[in-house]
Each structure stands twice: as C-alpha cells, then as structure tokens.
C-alpha cells in the first residue's frame, strides 16, 4: 500500500481531494504514508484518528498534504466545516480516510480509492484497490497506470 501511495503521488496536484474507503486495517494510513513520501512532505504520516486532521508541509516546494480521519465524525460536511478543508484544498492535496458520505460537497472533482483487504490461506494479506476519478479533473487521467 505504501508503494501504491508513492505511485499515486505522481499524479496528484494542489487542489486534489482523495477519499479513502476500506475497513479497519485495510491500509488507508499506509497508503497515505506513501503519498507523503511521494509528495516529499515533512513529518511522519500517522493516523490522525484522535486529532482528526494533520497538515504536513512540503519540503520540496510542492503541495502540503492534509491528512484527515473522519471516522469519529458522524455528521457529514457540517462537522467537517470546522476543519476549514475548503480553505486548505486549493493549495494542498487533501486525503480523507472514512470520508465517503461526508466530504463529497468539498469538490466536484475527487479521487475515490476503495481498498478491500482479502485475507487468504497464507500469511500474506492481499489488497484489491479500485481507483475512480470523479469530475473533469480526472477525465483525461490514466488511472489504470497506477496498478503497474
């Protein structure tokens, strides 16, 4: 998942909203850690479950990474407004774990990443990742190349 995040970072730019969906332990934070590495941001990317959001400024002149965990937020965009994500969005890459049904109104353009953790007979956990671009921003982007 971390390597996938590094690959995904190559197609992201300021203003992108990324929603991560997947059960507990699916790899959402690990993917975001890879995004942070790929974007060249400051600070260790860890789960923001209890602080709700963390901002990781760029060390390379690129966009900051705003990492949000909406797991404990129940009330859609109303609760999210206190985080001022709409202010951060134009200059940052905003990644929201557990954001489905809560942050869609922030942008007409967003990337929805769904992670399914399939536990097999071996010790290796297999992840199936579906990436869907929504809106004009993603219309011409070759998201299939992320799987390579």
Image (tube, rainbow, N blue to C red):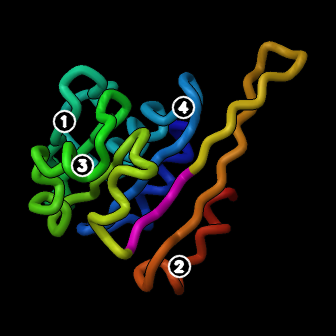
Q: Residue at x 31, y 65 (%)?
A: 105
Is residue 111 covered in magenta? yes
**Residue at numbered disc 4:** 27
Q: Earlier in the sequence, mark 1 or mark 4?
A: 4
Q: Residue at x 40, y 56 (%)?
A: 18
Q: Earlier in the sequence, mark 3 or mark 4?
A: 4
Q: Residue at x 86, y 16 (%)?
A: 122
Distance in Å between CA atoms under marks 3 and 4: 17 Å
Distance in Å between CA atoms under marks 3 and 2: 21 Å
Left or right side of 144 for 59: left
Question: Residue 142: which quarter of the image?
Answer: bottom right
Secondary structure found at label 3: strand
Please rate how many residues cluster around mark 1, counting C-alpha atoms within 10 Å: few if below 14, some from 14 to 19, many from 20: some
Residue 141 circle label = 2
Residue 65 circle label = 3
Please rate how many residues cluster around mark 3, counting C-alpha atoms within 10 Å: few if below 14, some from 14 to 19, many from 20: many
Tell me where residue 59 appears, x and y as whole percent.
15, 48
Distance in Å between CA atoms under marks 1 and 4: 18 Å
What are the residue bounds of the magenta stretch? Answer: 109-113
Are the two marked residues, 3 and 1, in contact with CB atoms closer than 8 angstroms? Answer: no
Work out whether residue 112 or residue 77 is closer to the camera in this orientation and state it: 77
Are the two marked residues, 3 and 4, in contact with CB atoms closer than 8 angstroms? Answer: no
Distance in Å between CA atoms under marks 3 and 1: 8 Å
Tell me where residue 48 appears, x and y as whole percent.
27, 27
Secondary structure found at label 4: loop
Left or right side of 116 for 88: left
Secondary structure found at label 2: loop
Q: Earlier in the sequence, mark 1 or mark 2?
A: 1
Q: Earlier in the sequence, mark 3 or mark 1?
A: 1
**Residue at numbered disc 1:** 54
């Amino acid at each position: 998942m971390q390597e996938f995040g590094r690959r995904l970072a190559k197609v992201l730019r300021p203003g992108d909203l990324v929603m991560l969906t997947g059960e507990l332990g699916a790899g959402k934070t690990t993917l975001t850690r890879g995004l942070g590495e790929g974007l060249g941001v400051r600070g260790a990317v860890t789960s923001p479950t209890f602080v709700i959001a963390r901002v990781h400024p760029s060390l390379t002149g690129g966009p900051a990474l705003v990492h949000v965990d909406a797991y404990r937020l129940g009330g859609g965009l109303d609760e999210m407004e206190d985080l001022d994500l709409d202010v951060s969005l134009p200059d940052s890459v905003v990644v929201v774990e557990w954001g489905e049904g809560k942050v869609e109104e922030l942008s007409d353009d967003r990337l929805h990443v769904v992670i399914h953790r399939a536990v097999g007979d071996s010790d290796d956990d297999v992840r199936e990742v579906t990436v869907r671009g929504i809106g004009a921003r993603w219309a011409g982007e070759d998201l299939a190349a992320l799987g390579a």
